[in-house]
Each structure stands twice: as C-alpha cells, then as structure tokens.
Amino acid sequence: MKKSLRIVTYNIHKGFRAANLRFVLPQMREALQKLDADLVFLQEIQGKHEKKERRIANWPAEPQFEFLARKFWPHYIYGKNALYRDGHHGNAILSKFEFLEWENIDVSKYKRSSRSMLHGVVAVPGLAARLHLICIHFALFKTERAKQLSILKTRILEHVPEDEPLIIAGDFNDWRGQAEHYLEAELGLKEVFKITEGQHAKTFPSWNPKLAVDRIYCRGLEIVSCQRLYLMPWRKLSDHVPLLAEFWG
C-alpha cells in the first residue's frame, strides 16, 4: 500500500516579518497548521533569545519549534547553527511520525558564519523503508556553499542507504544552481519544482519573489504535486515564502 506524504519547507526569519518590524510567529503557526503537512522543515527558528523574551509581549514561553509543533506535530528535532550571547537559532523538523534517530552536523567554514544541517530518520506507517530527512540552511557565499554541499554529499553517501527514501529541504541560498552538480548529477536526487515545473521556485523576498533559494530534493519517492505559497497570508509573514510538496512512497 502506498503512503501519501505532504511536506513543507519554510525559512521563518525567527518569527518576524521582513525588516524585523513585527513578531508574527502565532500567525505563522496558524497558517502552517492549515496546510496539514506530515513533515515541516524550518530554518532560522529561534531556540532561545533572552532579550526578545523580555521585550516582546507575546514571545512564547517555550522554544519556537515547540510552540509551532504544539498539538499538531507530536515529534520534533532542533539543531543549533548560530550561538550568541542572548541565545541561539537553527533548523528544526516537525513530524507526525516518530524519529528513530537524528544528528545535527556542523558544516561551517568560518565561525562568523556558522551553519549546520539536521539529519533525522523517521518510521512512516505504510512505507517499507525508513525515511531520511535533511533540513539545511547554507551560506550566502559560493566558496562556503561548495564546502557545505560537499559535506552533504558525503553525509548521504555514508549514512543514507540507496534503498531508503530521502528528502532534503531548506534554504540553499543557491540562486546560481551550484547544488545541481552535487545532488542531481552525482547522487540521483530530483528537485521537485524543476522536475514538475521546469525550473526552481522563486521564494525570496516574499513580497516580490525573485530568487530561487529554497528547494525540495527527493530520492526514492514519487512526486505527486508541488506549490509555491506566495499569496496571502504568506507574503505578509517571513521574508521567504514556503514550498509545499506531496509524494507517494
């Protein structure tokens, strides 16, 4: 029996609208829950920030990933990729399925630009094999991204068996298509929007998307559909718009 999987990837800009003018995490949670996704890949999610906790009236008592997951996604993992005096932020995956194992991998080239990728494995009822999930947020500069893509490639070769399905989603900051060589040509992954619509989805900035920086890659799954969520309310939330995809496993 085939299993339908619905996934979202979203850079939430630490719960703020563009230019950090308004805290909109509660509105983000409401919008995300309406999508009814099985798996949510999140970037720039705030794990802790002491100054914002004191200054912002509706700042949640728990970390942002727990606030977003509450009552809807019973399982979640979080990996720090930026630490500073007042707190930290990073990547998270929210899931309706139990995590069997997970690891946060440092892919930073420089301390001033710390980055990581979050690799989790879930058991999905109806899927014959374990499902691997990798949430990433790569650097702005080409030389840093090249190193990060190389680490990602090695991670997949060493930790993801070819007979187990894989989804990689997140903010690649790769508007020039550097990832294609590593992920498509060498590893056999497919980018959902490129396969379905002939080009990567433009997701940044949210009010007038011009750059294709967010991606969803897959292997071992059948692509059913994909959608760029650029209409309201999304264009008034983060500075990125989310991507939605559905698969058969």
Image (cartoon, rainbow, N blue to C red):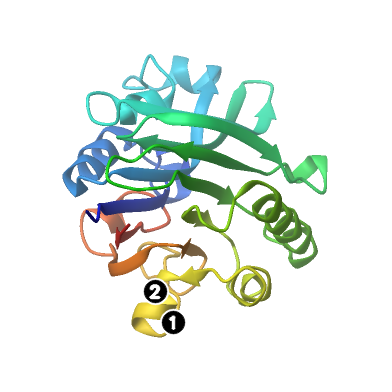
* Image quadrant in which you'd find residue 25: top left
Confirm or deny contact between disc 2 and disc 1 (CB under 8 A). yes
* 36 w.r.t. 79: above or below: below
In depth, the one of 125 and 55 nearer the eye is 125
Which quadrant does the C terminus fall into? Answer: bottom left
Q: Which residue is mark 2?
A: 193
Residue 220 quadrant:
bottom left
120 to 50, vertically: above or below: below
**Residue 207 coordinates in the image, percent (x, y):** 35, 64
Category of crowding for the residue at label 1, using alpha-carbon neighbours closer than 10 angstroms: few (below 14), some (14–19), many (at least 20): few
Q: Is residue 34 left or right of residue 243?
A: left
Q: Amino acid at mark 2?
A: Phe
- Residue 212, x across and y down, in percent: 49, 71
Q: Nearer the viewer, residue 29 or 155?
A: 155
Q: For mark 2, does the 10 Å Cα neighbourhood hold few (<14), some (14 to 19), or many (20 or more) residues?
A: many
Is any atom of residue 12 visible in this view? Answer: no
The location of residue 96, given as percent across then percent down, is: 30, 35
Helix, strand, or loop for circle 2?
A: helix
Identify the residue at the far bottom of this view. Answer: 198
Query: The residue tagged with tag 1: helix, strand or loop?
Result: loop
Q: Which mark is residue 199?
A: 1
Vertical arrangement, residue 193 with respect to residue 249, above or below: below
- Tell me the residue at 63%/70% (across/down): 179
Say what amino acid the circle numbered 1 marks: Gln
Residue occupying image coordinates x 60% and y 27%: 88
